[in-house]
Amino acid sequence: MHRLDIRVRPVHISLMQDLTRAVGRPREFDLDEAIRSAMNVFWDRGYHDAALPDLLSAMEISKGSFYKAFGDKKAIFLRALELYSDDAAQSISKVLASDPSPKMAIRNAFLRFADLSSGTKGRRGCFAVLTATEMLPGDTQSADLIRRHYRRLQNLFTKAVREGQAAGEIDDKVDPESISHFIIAHAQGMRVLGKLGSTRKQTLEDVDLIMRMLL
């Protein structure tokens, strides 16, 4: 009788290797964290002064991974601007839900802007404002994102104002859209003055004044 020699090839291992080659190597970094790191570079240096080596160092990725994941510097810049807008909208939405009184919730939101407009945070400024100053009006992509960013914030405040009017806390004869537009305009003015070194005392006085005048 002849001995039958059967050798089993590790098919499952070979198949996984083939699939890995087919789909490419897995990404070796966290995409969201990489975008956030890039955002901080753009925030501190601006689009034009942010060099690729600075971005790669902050993001802790290789040049090949950078181009494979994002395409080019402008693409990651726009992703960073979107992330900034998402963060801001989530933060303001949370603050506006922080008090059962819509009027007090709006004041809390102003206090948030006061914090961002004084001290170290104030001198850093607002990424959206800095981008608008640097990139507009020539860059339509940045303009669209910034316009959408401020519209999102204004919509949140418009909702809060309407709730305040329904609760009898805010004069219902004033247009909610007009109030919310004024809120955003004043808040961004605070951010700009924060670049010049506004103190917390000054920004808190601004909040008290605007609440008395507007609401």
Image (cartoon, rainbow, N blue to C red):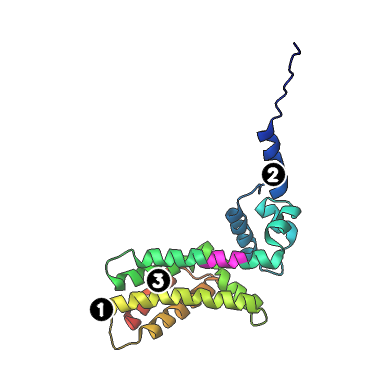
Give how far across and how far down residue 192 sits, in percent. Answer: 54, 75
Mark 3 Cα-neighbour bin, 10 Å: few <14, some 14–19, many ≥20: many
Q: Are the residues at dot 3 and dot 2 in contact (C-beta closer than 8 Å)?
A: no
Residue at mark 2: 20
Q: Who's the residue at 65% across and 76% down the image?
A: 135
Give how far across and how far down residue 169 sits, in percent. Answer: 25, 78
- From mark 3 to mark 1, how far is it between C-alphas? 21 Å
* Residue placed most toward the observer, 196 or 18: 18
Q: Amino acid at mark 3?
A: Phe
Numbered mark located on residue 102 in the image? none
Q: Amino acid at mark 1?
A: Ala
* Residue placed most toward the observer, 172 or 43: 172
Mark 2 Cα-neighbour bin, 10 Å: few <14, some 14–19, many ≥20: few
Q: Nearer the viewer, mark 3 or mark 1?
A: 1
Label 1 or label 2, whichever comes before in sequence order: 2
Is residue 193 visible to the viewer in this orientation of the structure?
Answer: no
Numbered mark located on residue 166 in the image? 1
Q: Residue furthest top?
A: 1
Q: Who's the residue at 66% across and 53% down the image?
A: 59
Q: Nearer the viewer, mark 1 or mark 2?
A: 2
Q: Nearer the viewer, mark 3 or mark 2?
A: 2
Residue at mark 3: 110
Tell whether position 149 is magenta: no
Please indicate whether residue 39 sits to the left or right of residue 155 in the image: right
Label 3 or label 2, whichever comes before in sequence order: 2
Give how far across and how far down residue 146 sits, in percent. Answer: 56, 75
Q: Amino acid at mark 2?
A: Thr
Instruction: Report the quarter where the C terminus lies.
Output: bottom left
Q: Which residues are magenta?
A: 79-85
Give how far across and how far down residue 54 sits, in percent. Answer: 71, 58
Q: Who's the residue at 69% across and 68% down the image?
A: 74
Q: Residue furthest bottom?
A: 173
